[in-house]
Image: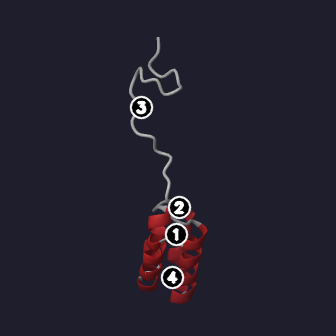
Amino acid sequence: MHAKDWFLVVIAILLPPVPVFIKRGFFSADFWINILLLILGFIPGLLHALYIISQYPYEEHSSYDGPTYPGANNGGNYGSI
């Protein structure tokens, strides 16, 4: 696991929904499941948060290639007439 994931584990020990929110987002089913599990008990919410952290690890590489400029020769026909 990456250091950012270990930091999320520490946050999960304090408040389990926060890392799930960071990993999956506010409108995800995982976030709301974690809220319900936390209402049922701290341990189920914590276990679910640890599961989410382990299933969606931090990725070092991004697929972002930078901005696309019209007419740029990047292998596509974007901006061509």
Q: Are marks 1 and 2 in contact (CB under 8 Å)?
A: yes
Q: CA distance from mark 3 to mark 2?
A: 30 Å
Q: CA distance from mark 4 to mark 3?
A: 44 Å
Residue type at mark 3?
Thr
Q: Residue under circle 2?
A: 28
Q: Residue under circle 3?
A: 68
Residue type at mark 4?
Leu
Q: CA distance from mark 1 to mark 2?
A: 7 Å
Residue type at mark 2?
Ser
Residue placed furthest toward the top: 81
Residue type at mark 1?
Trp
Q: Where is residue 41 drawn, in percent x and y?
A: 53, 88
Q: Where is residue 71 drawn, in percent x and y?
A: 41, 20
Quadrant, the N terminus = bottom right
Q: CA distance from mark 4 to mark 2?
A: 16 Å
Q: Nearer the viewer, residue 34 or 53?
A: 53
Residue in view at x 45 percent, y 85 percent = 13
Which disc, if any, is residue 32? Answer: 1
- Seen in the picture, residue 8 relative to 79 is either above or below; the reply is below
Q: Are marks 4 and 3 in contact (CB under 8 Å)?
A: no
Instruction: State the image quarter where residue 79 is shown.
Output: top left
Q: CA distance from mark 1 to mark 4?
A: 10 Å
Which disc, if any, is residue 38? Answer: 4
Which is closer to the viewer, label 4 or label 3? Answer: 3
Q: Are marks 4 and 2 in contact (CB under 8 Å)?
A: no
Instruction: State the image quarter where residue 51 is shown.
Output: bottom right
Earlier residue among tags 3 and 1? 1
